[in-house]
Image: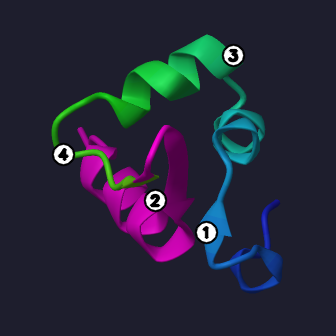
Amino acid sequence: MVNWDDLPLLLRVEDVAKLLQIGRNSAYDLCHRRGFPVVRVGRIFRVPKDGLKKWLEQQTVVE
């Protein structure tokens, strides 16, 4: 289980991949996806942890 409070404010793509249990390339694909919370500084992607948490909540499907 992830303790969100222990995570840094901005996550690297590798951190996102590890958290979501997906490959690094898939995490980079997410960063290029419309609606995914990403901050781009030059060629570097960073994902705000609060934005990722909110995005995950929005992706959850309840049936």
Label 2 is placed on what type of residue?
Leu
Mark 3–mark 4 Cα distance, whole angstroms, equals 20 Å
Whichever of callouts 1 and 2 sits on the residue coming sooner in the sequence is 1
**CB atoms of marks 1 and 2 within 8 Å:** no
**Residue type pointed to by label 1:** Leu
Q: Is residue 16 left or right of residue 54?
A: right
Reading the image, the residue beneath label 2 is: 52
What is the magenta range?
A: 41-63
Whole-number angstrom distance, CA of label 3 to CA of label 2: 16 Å
Q: CA distance from mark 4 to mark 2?
A: 11 Å
Q: Residue 22: image x %, image y %?
A: 66, 22
Residue highlighted by disc 4: 35
Residue 61 counted in the magenta span: yes
Check disc 1 and report its element: helix, strand or loop.
Answer: strand
Coordinates of residue 1 in the picture (x, y in percent): 82, 60
Q: Is residue 27 above or below residue 59?
A: above
Q: Residue at x 70, y 76 (%)?
A: 4
The amino acid type, in three-letter code, at marker 3 is: Gly
- Packing grade of label 4 (10 A; few <14, some 14-19, many >=20) is few
Would you name the residue on which mark 1 appears? 10
